[in-house]
Amino acid sequence: MESSSPDILLHCCCAPCAVGCVERLLAEGRRVTLFFSNCNIAPAAEYERRLDAVRQLADIYHLPLIEDVYDHDAWREAVRGLEKEPEKGERCPLCFVFSLARAAAAAEAHGIGGFTTSLTVSPHKNSRVIFAVARRFARFEEYDFKKRDGTRRSAELTRQYGFYRQKYCGCEFSFRAE
């Protein structure tokens, strides 16, 4: 869905993924608000490291940042029974629903016309799966940030700004798989 509003909320999984998305959205004339909502991330110290990097990103680009409440227990409940699923397995779509529902609620609460996610820039995430899940949210805008060399550009900007770059998606189940 394309929005007629220049305002867009960007669900940020991490600064390394979000930075290229921010650059692209700003180049398209969008007014970006960052939204950090990642209840899947464990341990809490990892969550804080990623949040600090997104705060840096917000400062660099002078963007507003909405920080969601970290509720790892609620996320664990949402994916209960799928703990042994491999990365990219059946747990991931439920994780996407969890985070995108929170992003949709934040966009609505803050009067932001549309929202999207930086998850689609990751080479480890299937954009088609994310879009299939996200279509249930009226304000979601499909941006496949991998396109137009987005992954490479995000990596380049991450090095330029010195953002913390994690080694796993965030959930303890993907960490164990590596």
Image (cartoon, rainbow, N blue to C red):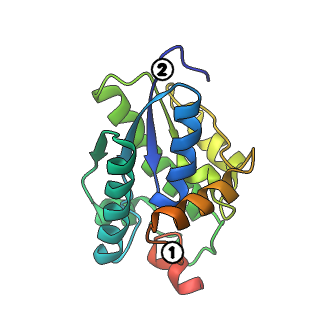
Would residue 14 be seen by someone viewing this image from the given angle? no
Q: Label 2: which residue?
A: 6
Q: Residue furthest left?
A: 69
Residue positioned 44% across, 66% down in the render: 163
Residue 19: percent from left, percent from top: 51, 52
Residue positioned 62% across, 23% down in the render: 1
Left or right: where 44 falls relative to 152: left
Q: Label 1: which residue?
A: 83
Q: Secondary structure at mark 1?
A: loop
Left or right: where 68 falls relative to 11: left
Residue 147: percent from left, percent from top: 74, 45
Residue positioned 60% across, 33% down in the render: 135
Rate crowding at label 2 as few (under 14), some (14 to 19) or many (20 or more) other CA atoms within 10 Å.
Answer: some
Relative to 74, is 140 above or below? above
**Count of numbered circles on the image:** 2
Left or right: where 167 falls relative to 86: left
Q: Secondary structure at mark 2?
A: loop
Of the two numbered discs 1 and 2 on the same chain, state the one appearing first in sequence. 2
Relative to 10, is 138 above or below? above
Q: Residue furthest top?
A: 4
- Picture quadrant of residue 21: top right
Residue 123: percent from left, percent from top: 69, 62
Left or right: where 109 falls relative to 30: left
Residue positioned 34% across, 77% down in the render: 43
Would residue 24 be seen by someone viewing this image from the given angle? yes
